[in-house]
Image: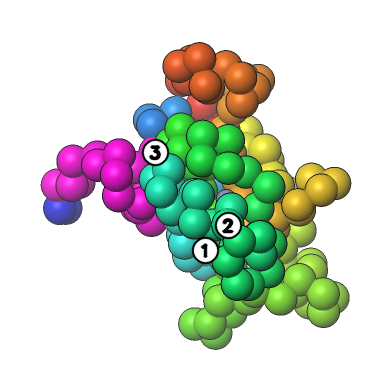
């Protein structure tokens, strides 16, 4: 076991250690359950620092590339350490596609599993659907996070 690096608010992360404990424990359990179901999940992002979120928001607006988020700095739950993105792997390669039936089925299986572990899955969002995105809010809204509230551990832990 390696000691987790201290959390740095100016540095984006793809480590589950960057999540607050109630989200981290659920994420670990979710990823383990996926593994038991034969699905390897690759974590691509956990904490996203405000500067990187601003950069992402600019994409497709003032910068090149497709629009990928409607969240400005401060508006993404990645910044409150309760959200993370995953991609399922097949034969050692990430499955980014969601259109082919085989891929859609895989993503839906992953999404449903995440929901079992109390995550909100952005694959169900009506606007800016994000298949890779999971967040643990325990009923809190963005305005609550902005006011400094964070989800409790909650019970029972899955
Ligand atoms: Zn995300």
* Dot 1 or dot 3, earlier in sequence: 3
Which tag is nearer the camera, tag 2 or tag 1? Answer: 2
> Is 34 placed left or right of 99 in the picture?
left
Which tag is nearer the camera, tag 1 or tag 3? Answer: 3
Q: Can residue 11 be seen in this snapshot?
A: yes
Quadrant of the rendered image containing residue 138: top right
- Residue underneath mark 3: 19
Check residue 13 for magenta coloring.
yes
> Is 21 placed left or right of 92 in the picture?
left
- Residue underneath mark 2: 58
The residue at the point 39 percent across, 38 percent down is 19
Check residue 7 for magenta coloring.
yes
Q: Secondary structure at mark 2?
A: helix
Specify the principal SS of the magenta part: loop
Residues rendered magenta in the picture: 3-19
Q: Secondary structure at mark 3?
A: loop
């Amino acid at each position: 076991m390696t000691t987790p690096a201290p959390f740095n608010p100016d540095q984006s992360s793809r480590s589950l250690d960057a999540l607050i404990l109630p989200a981290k424990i659920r994420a670990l359990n979710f990823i383990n359950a996926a593994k038991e179901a034969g699905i390897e999940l690759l974590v691509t992002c956990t904490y996203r620092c405000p500067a990187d979120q601003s950069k992402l928001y600019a994409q497709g607006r003032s910068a090149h590339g497709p629009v990928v988020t409607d969240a400005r700095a401060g508006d993404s739950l990645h910044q409150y350490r309760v959200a993370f993105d995953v991609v399922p792997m097949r034969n050692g390669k990430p499955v980014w596609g969601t259109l082919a039936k085989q891929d859609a089925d895989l993503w839906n299986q992953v999404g449903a599993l995440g929901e079992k572990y109390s995550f909100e899955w952005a694959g169900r969002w009506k606007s800016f659907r994000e298949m890779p995105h999971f967040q643990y809010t325990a009923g809190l809204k963005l305005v609550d996070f902005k006011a400094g509230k964070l989800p409790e551990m909650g019970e029972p832990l899955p």
